[in-house]
Amino acid sequence: MSKNYIQNLVGCFGYPVEENPSCIINNAAFEELGINWLYLTLEAAPEKLEDCLHALKTFNMKGCNFTIPHKINVLKHLDELSPEASIIGACNTMKHDNGKLIGTNTDGKGFVKALIDDAKIEIEGKRMLFLGAGGAARAMSVESALKGAAEITIASRTEAKGKELVDLINSRTNSKAELLLWDGEISIPSDIDILANATNVGMFPEVDNCPNIDYSSISSSLLVTDAVINPPKTKFLTNAESRGAKTLDGLGMLVYQAAIAIEFWTGQYPDCDVMKNAIMKEFNLG
């Protein structure tokens, strides 16, 4: 077989997607596993998502990831959805199996694994506050609830969207959830254990932006984490560190959710250290 022949093709559909580093970690994983797979980063405008999925079938791609703004909108195009993705109401990973599009969600699982393995934080019994109520927030908060978080606060700029997620957590998990309307600068309640930015605020190229919160309300007892991965050290995390808080960047979540997705596609679980080293080299983190 020619070394230029790619047997299995996957990728990431998003808009914008130019700076998304998923290809770096996925292709490093495929090389380490010794399998003939290639991961591409593919721009897919919202109004073209259905066309992109038809193209995926035409080229017999084995699956894809979805990032902003497709995680919720893609649901109507899928043939099957995993139970956890059905609860979350968002899909970030899809497998193409003989013409069928099967969706799941690895974002929340990656987030939870990063908290447990990298931050050494047990989620059970914790009080958590999530900034945002979109696809990433849904995955992160629901998986945290399923892992035993005691109380979850959803800060949302849109009351209806936030209330929908709060009602979902209250009805489908054992956690208690409440809505914090994010209609201006908000303070972080003193009883919160984990604060997570689940928005794209601060993502490249708008790296000087950060979520509109009262940073003086961040205490040294907090763990503050960010789903943004480019750049890894966001202004949000820098501000939290200046208040003495422990921080966790989004790279662990990125790697772990990708590893779970690779297993979903290939049946093989990759070496996460290889993936981490690849992304750290890309960002010159040594």
Image: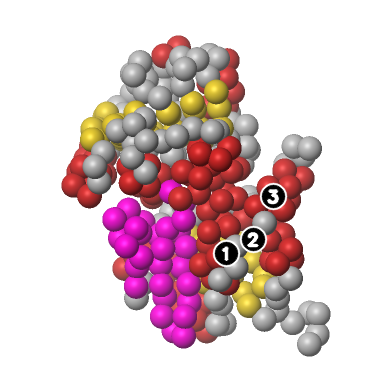
Determine the residue positioned at 20% across, 42% down.
170
Q: Where does the image place residue 191, in percent across and percent down from the top left?
A: 34, 19
Q: Would residue 181 appear left or right of 207 to someone viewing this image?
A: left
Disc 3: which residue: 273
Task: Tell me the amino acid under the disc marked 2.
Answer: Pro
Q: Earlier in the sequence, mark 2 or mark 1?
A: 1
Relative vertical location of residue 108 with respect to residue 60 in this rendering, above or below: above
Inspect the image, locate mark 1, and give the three-letter code of the amino acid beneath it.
Ile
Left or right of residue 153, residue 35 in this image: right
Q: Under tag 3, what secondary structure?
A: helix
Location of mark 1 (residue) = 262
Determine the secondary structure under disc 1.
helix
Q: Residue furthest bottom?
A: 1
The residue at the point 37 percent across, 47 percent down is 143
> Which span of residues is magenta-colored?
80-108
Q: In the picture, which quadrant includes the C terminus?
A: top right
Amino acid type assigned to the residue bearing label 3 in the image: Asp
**Image color mode:** secondary structure
Q: Callout 3 environment at 10 Å: few (<14), some (14 to 19), or many (20+)?
A: few
Q: CA distance from mark 1 to mark 3?
A: 14 Å
Find residue 72 and report its horizontal and vertical position in percent.
Answer: 36, 57
**Contact (CB < 8 A) between labels 2 and 3?**
no
Question: Which residue, given by chain and number where applicable, does mark 2 sit on?
Answer: 270
Report which quarter residue 164 is drawn in.
Answer: top left
Contact check, label 2 and label 1, Cβ < 8 Å: yes
Image coordinates for residue 146, horizontal then vertical, percent:
33, 46
Residue 231: % across, % down: 63, 38
